[in-house]
Image (tube, rainbow, N blue to C red):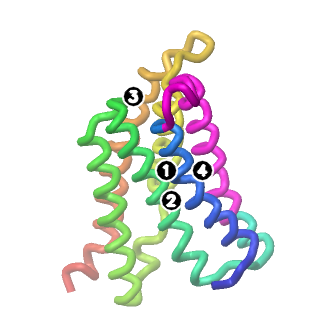
Amino acid sequence: MPLNLPNLLTWLRILFIPLVIGVFYLPASWLSATEANLIATVLFIVAAATDWLDGYLARKLNQTSAFGAFLDPVADKLMVAAALIVLVDLDRTHSVIALIIIGREIAISALREWMAKAGKSGSVAVSFIGKLKTAFQMISISLLLYWEPLAGIPIQMLGHLLIALAALLTLLSMFYYLRMAAKTLRE
């Protein structure tokens, strides 16, 4: 495993996962609900920003590696899945939405691995709809973690709307990737 800045940022994202989750389970005497919401949201946004930053730095500094290419999507999926499970536990999102998003991530990861073994990984390379899905997921999860009204903006309602759109984009992107892989899947 090459130890470079992009890989360190990916590991940092993984280390943030228990912090984002743990804040909600600290005793109420340590943090108020509002403080827990704010801290978890800030940690999640910082972790989400490292997703963009590690990829940018890997390309800019010419520090791409097979290990980094493997670890980066794993870190993303762990972060999203952990946050969704906490949001379901806190009754801030519906379990069906979490299952759609987490299930798609597992299915497409398996599809990508299978396509790579078949020598056709380019067929399921990240697409615009996949990037759009990720943006909606990160924004909606951040809003649902924050939960509090902000400057008159109904964060809860906006978070619910965006997570539903994220689930829809999640399904659309899954069908897109399955269609791209259909010929190889039929063989």
Earlier sequence position, callout 4 versus callout 1: 4
The range drawn in magenta is: 26-55
Q: In the image, is 112 to the left or to the right of 131?
A: left
SS assignment at label 1: helix
Marks 2 and 1 close (CB-CB < 8 Å):
yes
| Residue ID for mark 1 | 134
Q: Residue at x 45, y 29 (%)?
A: 159
Marks 4 and 2 close (CB-CB < 8 Å):
no
Earlier sequence position, callout 4 versus callout 2: 4
Above or below — where is 121 with respect to 157?
below
SS assignment at label 4: helix
Location of the C terminus (image quadrant): bottom left
| Residue ID for mark 3 | 161
For residue 93: magenta? Answer: no
Q: Identify residue type, mark 4.
A: Ala
| Residue ID for mark 4 | 48
SS assignment at label 2: helix
Marks 4 and 1 close (CB-CB < 8 Å):
no
